Amino acid sequence: MALIKSISGIRGTIGGRSGEGLSPIDVVKFTAAFAHILLQNSTSKKIVVGRDARMSGEMVSNLVVGTLQSLGADVINLGLSTTPTVEIAVPMENAAGGIILTASHNPGQWNALKLLNAAGEFINDEEGQKVLALGESLDFDFADVEDLGKEIKDDTYLQKHIDAVLALPLVDVEAVRQANFSVAVDAVNSTGGLFIPALLEAMGVQTVHKIHCEPNGDFPHNPEPLKEHLTDLSAAVVKNKADLGIAVDPDVDRLVFMMEDGELFGEEYTLVAVADYILEHTKGNTVSNLSSTRALRDITQKHGGTYYAAAVGEVNVVTKMKEVNAVIGGEGNGGVIYPESHYGRDALVGVAIFLTHLAKLGKKMSTYRAELPQYFMSKNKITLTPGLDIDGLLAKMQDKYKHEQHSTIDGLKIDFENEWVHLRKSNTEPIIRIYSEGPTQDAAEAIAQKIINEIEAIIK
């Protein structure tokens, strides 16, 4: 059992004792704390709630909705929804904030509360700490009976979200319709099974091969959209001779494409391809986190823009995007953030822009992929003895590489001429994550192993 409180929200496994998993008590106290803070700082009494399709979703939703009403909030309940849909609904409803009930790519026994401010954006770490502290103290009053909030069920946001995506100036529905794409979709039996096929139909895609698109929460494979989990999608693309495959995680904020040969386009390259199209039509800057591919930098420079790196975490990327007025940004895990739409990772936006781009290119996906900057990534970790001074260890590594270009805004990233390595300590376990990238897979793994050996030498 586990309960993790971080910048990504309050997430945990269902079952077990309070404080050891995401128990009903934990759901109620943190929901209540968040609602109290929202209502204290807003003239609106509305709070938007939506959930993915995981099996605990209805139970957690009932707890959240009732708790919000007990604070006097009027709940706009979207029911089965997506993270980006809730994000756009909050400002559309002029709500005080929102709560998304999803553990994103975590397995089915997990669920989470993801907390949004009045702009429909994730709250920052300082705001999150206030929620956690108030949730533990419960130093506030609940509403009197005559002041209880009401629940308003609203199932219109699937269409509203699609309409908003299709209204984006760089989305060309007619080009996609004329391309006559055949598309396979794996939505891991969550809400992407409702939203992605509906978007494709609205864009004129006539042939959609749906696998794992029943939103029943019975995840047929690990829900993180990685190559080893998407064998069914690969088989469906090849069998049906589809032009491409689309995979999303349970809350539809991560997007991965499959090429016509059944090979992954690469989750790191979702953002790269979308940025390539956006920058062709809109000059400007880009942002991704420090652990994302260098290919985005190359594409940005090709189009005359400047690339910036942010600390890992969507809220950090969004903060940096606003600071440098980026026209496109996101994360290398398949997360596309397009400010023209909203400041949140949105697979629907990513699908619409990518299909437009592919239609206008008139090329097979594999051909286009081969034209993009070629980089390969290796992801490793070192398990450390509990109590080891990880910060001190990273400081020694920084000193060792002080003459190389490096960043310490999030752990330590060392930029070599042809490779980079990013070292980050985990917030939840005694490990250092080691991400590396190079012009070949062997180069990426070699530089990672070199750094691992040096860390182990320091420890000894």
Image (cartoon, rainbow, N blue to C red):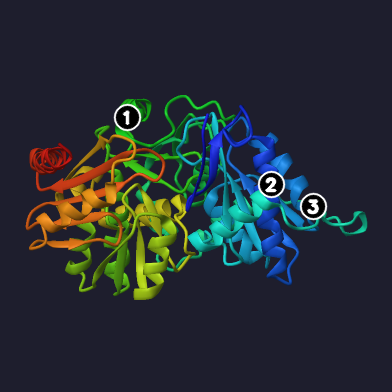
Residue 182: where, in percent of width, then height?
38, 39
Q: Is residue 357 left or right of residue 340?
A: left
Quarter placement of the C terminus: top left
Mark 1 / mark 2, whichever is N-terminal: 2
Q: Are marks 2 and 3 in contact (CB under 8 Å)?
A: no
The amino acid pointed to by label 1 is Ser
Q: Nearer the viewer, residue 103 or 384?
A: 384
Q: Nearer the viewer, mark 2 or mark 3?
A: 2
Residue 23: where, in percent of width, then height?
64, 34
Mark 2 / mark 3, whichever is N-terminal: 2
Task: Count neighbours of disc 3 (C-alpha within 10 A) and say few if under 14, some if 14 to 19, many if 20 or more.
Answer: many
Q: Which mark is residue 69?
A: 3
Residue under pointer 1 = 234
Label 1 to label 2: alpha-carbon separation: 43 Å
The amino acid pointed to by label 2 is Lys
Taking the spot 16% from the left edge, 47% from the top edge, the residue there is 437
Per the image, label 1 sits on a secondary structure element best described as: helix
